[in-house]
């Protein structure tokens, strides 16, 4: 069965609780429920995880690469800092779509650069939480990773 892992990084557990003007009112539980519903509809095994720790994301990206799961990744602030997460995607051969809820290019300069963009299959930015659904649809249109 095809697998999609939905990985969210630091502070995304706060979705819907703070800064609704930037990130909207939906919670992470809402996002994950939508991903699971899409999985049921399309016969995809969906695993949702969130961590505030860089190493957890590295471990989960390696696992996805090993097991042939596709990844929808919002690495949060680590997007702009993490060589380790980039190396995990590239090193494990993980196929990932990078998602950002906000339009990072319309925000502070330091959010304009992503260490991850050169090693992911595609990037979806600025569509709010719809970006996760768009990433799911994009993956469905690709040949399964394995
Ligand atoms: O727009 C995105 O999805 C981001 O990945 C979110 C990250 C930010 O560092 C990136 O530059 C862009 C921050 C996630 C923080 O999420 C919060 C959600 C609600 C309240 C406070 C923080």
Image: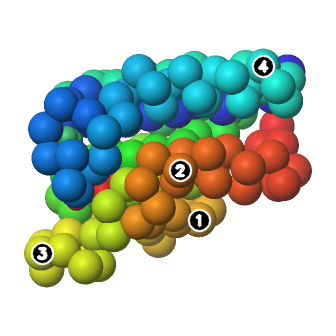
What is the x, y in percent for residue 92?
A: 55, 42
What is the x, y in percent for residue 15?
A: 26, 35
Q: Residues within 10 Å of mark 3 (few under 14, many from 20)?
A: few
Mark 2 and 3 residues: CB-CB less than 8 Å, in contact?
Answer: no
Q: Secondary structure at mark 3?
A: loop
Can you tell which mark lies on residue 9? Answer: none
Of the 4 image quadrants, the one containing the N terminus is top right
Residue that mark 2 sits on:
130
Mark 2 and 1 residues: CB-CB less than 8 Å, in contact?
Answer: no
Question: Considering depth in this image, is 68 or 74 the residue closer to the camera?
Answer: 74
> Which of the 4 image quarters holds residue 34?
top right
Mark 1 and 3 residues: CB-CB less than 8 Å, in contact?
Answer: no
Which residue is found at the position 47% from the left and 71% from the top?
Answer: 118
Q: Give me the C-alpha separation between circle 3 and circle 4.
A: 38 Å
The answer to whether residue 135 of the structure is visible from this angle is: yes
Q: Secondary structure at mark 4?
A: helix
Residue that mark 1 sits on:
122
Q: Give me the C-alpha separation between circle 4 and circle 2.
A: 18 Å
Residue that mark 4 sits on:
40
Q: Give me the C-alpha separation between circle 2 and circle 3.
A: 22 Å
Q: Nearer the viewer, mark 2 or mark 3?
A: 2
Residue that mark 3 sits on:
108
Mark 4 and 2 residues: CB-CB less than 8 Å, in contact?
Answer: no
> Which of the 4 image quarters holds residue 121?
bottom right
Q: Give me the C-alpha separation between circle 4 and circle 1.
A: 24 Å
């Amino acid at each position: 069965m095809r697998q999609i892992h939905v990985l969210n990084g630091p502070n995304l557990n706060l979705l819907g609780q703070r800064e609704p003007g930037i990130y909207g009112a939906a919670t992470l539980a809402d996002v994950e429920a939508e991903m699971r519903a899409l999985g049921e509809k399309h016969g995809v095994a969906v695993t949702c995880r969130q961590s505030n720790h860089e190493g957890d994301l590295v471990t989960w990206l390696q696992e996805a690469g090993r097991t042939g799961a596709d990844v929808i990744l919002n690495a949060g602030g680590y997007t702009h800092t993490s060589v380790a997460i980039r190396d995990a995607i590239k090193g494990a051969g993980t196929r990932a779509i990078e998602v950002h809820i906000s339009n990072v290019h319309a925000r502070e300069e330091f959010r304009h650069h992503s260490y991850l963009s050169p090693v992911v299959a595609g990037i979806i930015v600025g569509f709010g939480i719809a970006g996760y659904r768009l990433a799911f649809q994009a993956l469905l249109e690709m040949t399964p990773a394995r």
